[in-house]
Image (cartoon, rainbow, N blue to C red):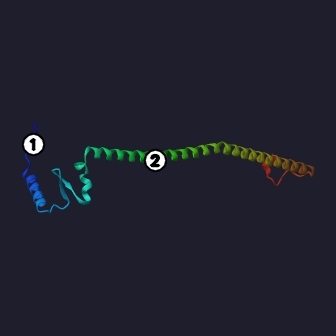
Amino acid sequence: MPVRTKPSRQEIAAAENLYRDFRERQADGHGLHKGLVVRTGLMTLRSFFQTASVRERVYLFTAASAVWESHAGVMLRRLSGDVGEQISSIQNASSEIPQGNADLSRRAEAAAMSVQETASATTGMTMRCRTMLTRRGRPISCPLGRAMLR
């Protein structure tokens, strides 16, 4: 059992004006297709789903899906390539860390040895200064400072 609704006065007036325009050939941008009011001219594509057959709609959907899948595949490949580059960069950096640590350790050891050599040389100079001053019978004083003679 079909269900129909009664159109409002405004809807009736709009339809009468539109059909009058069709009769007088003044319906710019509109046309009729199997009883449907459709767009014409540059706006024809807006009426595509009203006028297209099921076969045309399925074909369009299939083509759009293929294009989308292709685009998504390209984007996924680009993304995986970018991620691969980032992983490679992290691997390179992480392999450089142990080398840097070893180099830093060698430098710290060399600096420690240098400090020990300096301390040893200072102690030697202090001892020589004491020996020289005590042989001459003078009180012990040294240009290196009193702290060095204790």
> Where is the N terminus found, in terms of image quarters?
top left
Give the total of numbered labels: 2
Quick check: 17 left or right of 130? left
Residue drawn at (79%, 50%) of the image: 146
The percent coordinates of residue 24 (x first, y second) are 11, 62
Outermost top residue: 1
- Identity of the residue drawn at 74% across and 44% down: 109
Left or right: 57, with 139 as reference point = left
- Nearer to us in this view, 62 or 79: 62
The residue wearing badge 1 is: 4
Q: Secondary structure at mark 2?
A: helix
- Numbered label attached to residue 125: none
**Residue 99 location (% of width, % of height):** 68, 44
- Crowding near the residue tagged with mark 2, few <14, some 14–19, many ≥20 C-alpha atoms within 10 Å: few
Q: Nearer the viewer, residue 44 or 147?
A: 44
Q: Is residue 81 above or below residue 23?
A: above
Instruction: Report the amino acid beneath label 1.
Output: Arg
Residue at x 8% of width, y 50% of height: 8
Q: CA distance from mark 2 to mark 1?
A: 50 Å
Q: Which residue is mark 2?
A: 74
- Disc 1 element: loop
Three-letter amino acid code at disc 2?
A: Val
Q: Nearer the viewer, residue 130 or 72?
A: 72
Of mark 2 and mark 1, the one earlier in the sequence is: 1
Q: Is residue 106 left or right of residue 1?
A: right
> Label 1 neighbourhood size at 10 Å, few (<14), some (14-19), many (20+)?
few
Task: Residue 43: give x, y in percent of width and height.
Answer: 25, 57
Considering depth in this image, is 101 or 62 the residue closer to the camera? 62
Q: Which quadrant of the rendered structure holds the C terminus? A: top right
Q: Are marks 2 and 1 in contact (CB under 8 Å)?
A: no
